[in-house]
Amino acid sequence: MFLKNKKVVVMGVANKRSIAWGCAKALKEQGADIIYTYQNERMKKQLLKLAEPTDLLVECDVSSDESIAQAFTIIQEKFDKIDGLVHAIAFANKEELDGNVSDITRSGYLLAQDISSYSLLAVAHYAKPLLNPGSGIVTMTYLGSERAIPNYNMMGIAKASLETAVKYLAYEFAVDKIRVNGISAGAIKTLAVTGVKDYDQLIKLSEDRTPDKAGVTIEEVGNTCAFLVSELAAGIVGDIIYVDKGVHLT
Ligand code: NAD
């Protein structure tokens, strides 16, 4: 168990299909204690079904600096220091995940960038004083940042921004021995993905291009996440690691 006695904040569990839940399970298997953050009361209800009664659950809506600040104050009061953070959060309006990118509205663009990319920087800002040297921050991205994948549209643009934020943040935080990396996961049927028009084609694309025609699982993404959070990944700084069973190769 390579994360024994480590405390890791996991942001973005909506239900048992969430990538963040795959991460939480893998982190726990490696001995970590998990601190969950949830967006709102509706998400809290789902989380209560999954978390252990002793786990700390903290509200954190990343669209609000106040909410982020409050969440990390609560976490600091309870645990003082943490050893990792998993950012598995994204949002875009349905209209921005369909049709033409030239029709994306200014407000839709800003919203998607705010929740899906800026939030990593905002969360890192408030988490930094709590993060022990040796900690790892991990975020989630997708191949649609590099290639024009049908209907991924606005989220592809936001993921490109997120991936570059990973690099700059990694460069800044490396001085304090805090590593920042991203996982580029294959498409998985989650709540977020169902916002993309014809999302079943996105999933099919990520299944058909794997050698065994089976898409990546949240458990496989979770195991890589646990590794990247841990000091086993001490040499990996500012990288985006594909966990898509080879989809990106062809
Ligand atoms: P999900 O719907 O299970 O999780 C998305 C989470 O984002 C939810 O928990 C939701 O509450 C949270 N969120 C949205 N707005 C928020 C806000 N304002 N404040 C706080 N939290 C907020 O879906 P998922 O697919 O597990 O998504 C997790 C991450 O993985 C996202 O960044 C997503 O883009 C990325 N990703 C997903 C896939 C996929 O195919 N599912 C592939 C690659 C990357």
Image: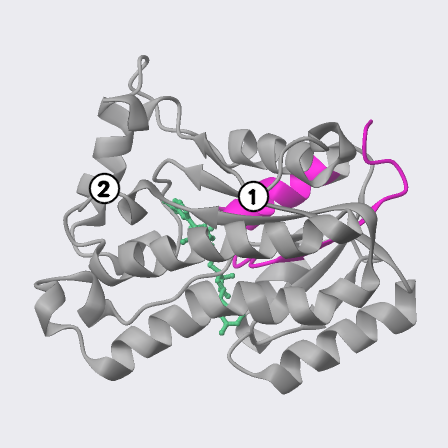
The residue positioned 49% from the left and 58% from the top of the image is 165
On the question of residue 16 being in view, the answer is: no
The residue positioned 37% from the left and 40% from the top of the image is 188
Q: Is residue 44 above or below residue 106?
A: above
On the question of residue 224 being in view, the answer is: yes
Residue 238 — which label? Answer: 1
Screen quadrant of the N terminus: top right
Contact between labelled residues 2 and 1, with CB atoms less than 8 Å apart: no
Please tell me how crowded label 2 is: few (under 14), some (14-19), or many (20+) other residues with Cα within 10 Å. Answer: many
Q: Of helix, strand and loop, which one carries label 2?
A: helix
Circle 2: residue type: Leu
Q: Position of residue 244 (x, y in %)?
A: 39, 29
The quarter of the picture where residue 79 lies is bottom right
Magenta stretch: residue 7 in it?
Answer: yes
The residue positioned 81% from the left and 68% from the top of the image is 75
Screen quadrant of the C terminus: top left
Residue at numbered disc 2: 202
The residue positioned 22% from the left and 33% from the top of the image is 204
Q: Which residues are magenta?
A: 1-27
